[in-house]
Image: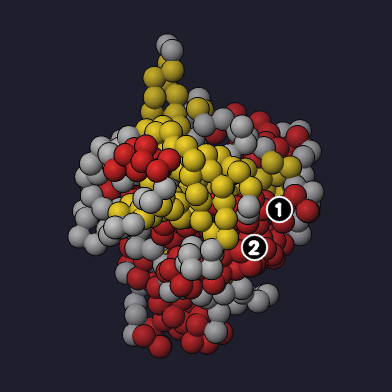
Amino acid sequence: MNKIYVNELNNYIDKDIVFSGFVDTIRDKKWVMFVILRDSTGKVQMTIEKSVEENSNLLEIMSNLSKDSVIKVTGKLVSNEAVKLGGIELIPSKIEVLSNANELPFDYNNLDGVNLDTRLDYRFLDMRNEKNILVRKVESCLVEGMREYLYSKDFTEIHTPKLIGAASESGSEVFEVKYFDRNAYLAQSPQFYKQMAMAAGLSKVFEVAPAFRAENSNTNRHATEFTSFDIEFSYIDSYLDVMDLEEDLLIAGLTKVKEKYGDTIKEVFGKEVIIPKKPFPRIKLQDLYQELHNLYNYEIPKEDIGDMNAEAEKLTTRYAMEKYNSEFIFVTDYSATKRAFYHMRNEEGIPCGYDLIWRGSEITTGAQREHRYDVLVNQAKEKGLGEDVKFYLEFFKYGMPPHGGFALGVDRLTMLLLGLPSVKETQFLFRGPNRLTP
């Protein structure tokens, strides 16, 4: 049987249907019982007249049923302008109880005062909140929009392994797992495999998949497992081509969200979905330091010189809005000591890459990659990397086109889009240093 959803009910007016859903509300009046049923797309009213003798069994069933139980209703869908929920109501002839709900540990419709850890312990209930369901739909729409854009540009979606034999990028930030008679690691990113695809001649690839970081960080924007949207493509002239593609990708994703959920997001979250204009403003890191000093009397701490920190990112967004009226800004010319060994460097030794800042947070590190084998070997040695990247260096021995790419953290992107306080509320199930269940 194909389930009929609430958003499809207008196609069934004056027809006999079978509808299944959660019991959202029961209002037992003197002459009539109103029951609000819901599914993932909305709510519908079921009306049981007490004066109708045949309804006695239905009334008994509903009188003994708890909120959030799941029922299957056979009945007729009719128009009724007095009904606020879409001007339709369901008149039942048969009710079957599919699942009876126990008393809930908290009211998911009123989460004020409910501890976040408690909500996460019962995430399956917390998600029943309409606001949280909307988060999931918005994130899905955003990813769909970006995927559609890449497919339209003839990108190939790939799926790379998350169990790897050597610690990638930074051995101190990987999870070690037992793999039969030896150790394996959870991948921090698909970076090496994306570049392997370039060596294979795929030219344009992307992946949306989990990534893992063994960082004991408890900030609002970090997680030990998150969803990464990774892109890599060949035959670029410079990292400016990478920046250009990311602009188009984000515009496509945000446009899709605005068209489908823009009004709802503004109503529920109070946030405007703003479609940025190309090109996004761009500034070199040293010039940015000077601007932040001149405008806001901010000095980058000594340990962060050559890079950014959370406070600098917030001020950078303020600067971008005040000077360029842009929520987005690219920051380039980071220190080589703060960038990965596989980033190409220019003649001055400056990495050919960038960070993209949006709404006070870094959302992307992108770059042109070093594709010349001998240069890459030297940069790996400089970082103290040897056997761990030996398999990776093999990709570059047999011909490698110039290429570049970037990654977006989907959870952080959604958090910033909706103005949520933490990725704990963005992720379907949060993983952090102190949370491994449910």
- Where does label 2 land, which residue? 256
The image quadrant where one finds the C terminus is top left
Give the SS element for disc 1: helix
Q: Nearer the viewer, residue 402 or 222?
A: 222
Question: In terms of depth relative to the viewer, which is nearer, 319 or 255?
Answer: 255
Asked where in the image residue 246 lies, by quadrant, the reply is bottom right
Task: Give, as a three-letter code, the residue at label 2.
Answer: Lys
In contact (CB < 8 Å): disc 2 and disc 1: yes
Relative to 265, 254 lies left or right: right
Can residue 359 be seen in this snapshot?
no
Reading the image, the residue beneath label 1 is 148
Number of marks in picture: 2
What is the x, y in percent for residue 305?
39, 66
Identify the residue shown where x is 60% and y is 29%: 391
Residue 28 horizontal/vertical position (percent)? 30, 54
Q: Quadrant of the N terminus?
A: top right
The colour scheme is secondary structure
Residue 30's spot in the image, x, y percent? 29, 58
Nearer to the camera, 354 or 44: 44
Q: Residue at x 54, y 59 (%)?
A: 88
Amino acid at pointer 1: Glu
